Amino acid sequence: MTKANPVEVQKHLKGVDYPADKQELIRHAQQQGADREVLSLLERLPEDEEYETPAELNKAIGEIQ
């Protein structure tokens, strides 16, 4: 299984309003037609974090892969 990369994730999060928490990111990605790999990656983010910017989210994604 190939891992979703941050560029792929951000493609599905275009237009999301930051700051955003995990559930907001998952909901937005689903609405944008994200595939299973992208959603699975977002689901692995910590529950209690809020991401201020796409760069901050990319850093968190890099830490869980």
Image (cartoon, rainbow, N blue to C red):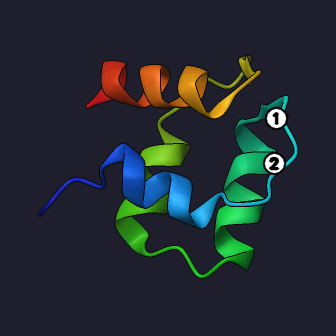
Q: Residue at x 44, y 20 (%)?
A: 59
The disc labelled 1 sits on which kind of residue? Answer: Ala
Q: Residue at x 58, y 65 (%)?
A: 12
**Contact flag, marks 1 and 2 (Cβ < 8 Å):** yes
Q: Position of residue 34 (x, y in %)?
A: 53, 73
Q: Circle 1 — which element?
A: strand
Q: Give the camera-side residue of 18 and 47.
A: 18
Furthest-bottom residue in this view:
33
- Mark linked to residue 49: none
Q: Position of residue 2 (x, y in %)?
A: 14, 61
Label 1 sits on residue: 20
3D distance between C-alphas at marks 1 and 2:
6 Å
Q: Give the camera-side residue of 11 and 60.
A: 11
Query: From what the image shows, is residue 27 above or below residue 47?
Result: below
Q: Residue at x 41, y 71 (%)?
A: 36
Quarter holding residue 22: top right
Quadrant (top left/top right/bottom left/bottom right) for the N terminus:
bottom left
The disc labelled 2 sits on which kind of residue? Answer: Glu
- Mark linked to residue 24: 2
Query: From what the image shows, is residue 32 above or below residue 58?
Result: below
Q: Residue at x 47, y 37 (%)?
A: 44
Q: Position of residue 21 (x, y in %)?
A: 78, 33
Q: Position of residue 14 (x, y in %)?
A: 68, 60
Quadrant (top left/top right/bottom left/bottom right) for the C terminus:
top left
